[in-house]
Image: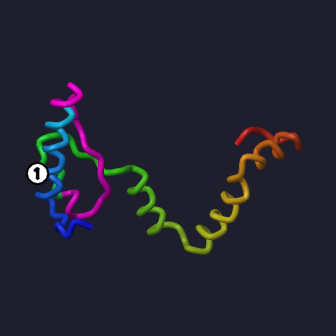
Amino acid sequence: MTGTKETASVHCNIVDRCIFLALDKHNTNIYTVISDNAANMIKMGKLTTIWHLTCNSHTANLLTKDLVSKPLIDKAKVLLKAFHGPDAEKELLNQGGRRI
């Protein structure tokens, strides 16, 4: 929204600024940054002086898209949505089932 290109060096500068602000304002050290797997983020991780980890959830999502068929994913979404509400687990327990 700022019009600033989101390059690795721009992100690295943001990380450096956050490290400074955390220490200066909150007396807290930042030891790692977690990002998605975008190329600019991977490069930022190589440029920064702290540990860089990619989000495991994002990685799992990418693996799932590559390994699981779309029809199976669609069926799993329907099943998960059926159990999403707060009353679904209560009803399951009432019928003799176990906690999800």
Residue 21 spot, x, y in % from top left = 18, 37
Toward which corner of the image does residue 10 lie, by quadrant?
bottom left
Magenta residues span 23-42
Query: Considering depth in this image, is 68 or 90 the residue closer to the camera?
Result: 90
Residue 61 position (above or below residue 29) = below
Disc 1 marks which amino acid? Leu
Asked if residue 31 lies left or right of residue 81, the reply is left
Quarter where residue 89 is shown: top right
Could you tell me how many numbered marks the image carries? Answer: 1
- Quadrant that contains the N terminus: bottom left
Q: Is residue 94 left or right of residue 18?
A: right
Disc 1 crowd rating (10 Å Cα; few below 14, some 14-19, many 20+) is some
Which percent across, then down, holds residue 2?
Answer: 22, 66
Considering every residue shown, the one lying at the far top of the view is: 27
Q: Is residue 82 above or below residue 1?
A: above
Q: Residue at x 59, y 67 (%)?
A: 73
Q: Residue at x 56, y 74 (%)?
A: 70
Magenta includes 77? no
Q: Residue at x 73, y 39 (%)?
A: 99
In the image, residue 26 lies in the stretch drawn in magenta: yes
Q: Colour mode?
A: rainbow
Hey, which quadrant is residue 59 in on the image? bottom left
Task: Residue 12: give x, y in percent of width and height.
Answer: 14, 52
31 above or below 62? above
- Picture coordinates of residue 47 (x, y %)? 10, 51
Q: Which residue is mark 1?
A: 47
State left or right for residue 67 relative to residue 25: right
Quadrant location, the C terminus: top right
Furthest residue toward right: 95
Residue 1 versus residue 94: which sits nearer the camera?
1
Q: Secondary structure at mark 1?
A: helix
